Amino acid sequence: MWRTRARCSAVPLAICGLLALAACASPAPTPTLNATPTLMSARLRLAGATSMHPVTQALIAAYVGRGPGVQITLETGVAGDGLEAVRRGIAEIGLVARDLPSEAERAQMPDFAALLCAPVALDGVVIIVHADNPVRGVSIEQLRHIYSGEMHDWGDLGGKPGDIVVVSREATSDTRHVMDAKVMQGEAVTLRAVVAPTSEAVVAYVQRHPNAIGYVSAPYLRAGVKGLFVEGVSPDKAAVRAGEYPLVRPLYLVTVQEPMPAAHAFLAFVLSPTGQAIVGQFHVPLD
């Protein structure tokens, strides 16, 4: 559906002797694997950030292929809040693609300490434009002016003169949360922005509209769009890993602190060498 837009403290935890994870800490320590993950027969529900759907789908396919009796469903229709999905019992595992809540935000979430947040990767939020757009890069300040509506012509960025069509995400999107925090810094997104429900929808819109600009997770780059340099830095994996790219975020899988055995086993698989090799096909895996 389209419309026109009118961190708990860092505490390492061991999960059944397999993982050392952060109790929703920010920044979170690197998990340590002490054993080979064991497959568990059960039904798991995953929900949350659409930016994590491609890697999650690949992980699910690999995990289910390792043994019978594992049923895993991923809500793919719209973006959701992975933290809320777990807190409300909608999912056993939540997908979170942003920094964890601040101290002030956690004060409004009395049950936040009951959640377990496992860092699984780093991701770059890529600013995308149509493949034929001659503009190669933008600064954070220019992005803020574009998304606030102050800058509205591609000619101001060295491109062909024409109205900039701003494509954003809904307020519940983790990728939108990153843009608000790192780019907008308190300024409101223009009411003229087109608001897309998913990362795929952003890409599809920019592919069809030569004057559009949007933002997506790196794995969503497709033919017909291109990623811009931000502050002179390419949004490639090397720059994300080194922390040089300005729009880097952590990716988490979230459960309750004492997850059901099947959820525990899936987390262990994701953090195992096999799982991290799959993660590396999409994002920057843990070191």
Image (cartoon, helix red, strand yellow):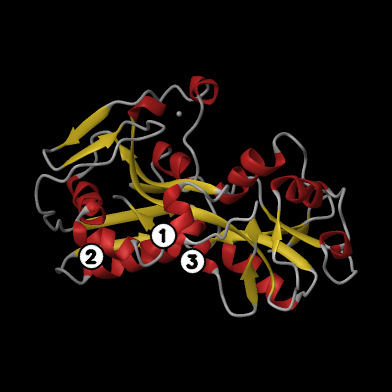
The quarter of the rendered structure image containing the N terminus is bottom right
Residue nearest the viewer, comparing 221 with 253: 221
Percent across and percent down for residue 138 are 71, 56
Residue bearing mark 3:
219
Q: CA distance from mark 3 to mark 1?
A: 7 Å
Whether the residues at callouts 3 and 1 have beta carbons within 8 Å, the answer is: yes
Side of 105 relative to 89 (left or right): right
- Where 145 sits versus 229, above or below? above
In contact (CB < 8 Å): disc 3 and disc 2: no
Spatial distance from mark 3 to mark 2, Cα to Cα? 20 Å
- Of callouts 3 and 1, the N-terminal one: 3
Q: Nearer the viewer, mark 3 or mark 2?
A: 3
Residue 158 horizontal/vertical position (percent): 83, 65
Q: Give left or right: position of 85 versus 153.
A: left
- Label 1: state its secondary structure: loop
Q: Is residue 165 left or right of residue 13?
A: right
Circle 2 is placed at which residue position? 63
Q: Give the residue type that dot 3 points to.
A: Pro
Name the disc covering residue 283, or none: 1
Label 1 crowd bin: few (<14), some (14–19), many (20+), radius 10 Å: many
Q: Earlier in the sequence, mark 3 or mark 2?
A: 2
Q: Secondary structure at mark 2?
A: helix
Mark 1: which amino acid?
A: His
Residue furthest front as drawn:
232
**Disc 2 residue type (three-letter):** Tyr
Q: Earlier in the sequence, mark 1 or mark 2?
A: 2
Q: Quadrant of residue 86?
A: top left
> How many discs mark residues in the rendered view?
3
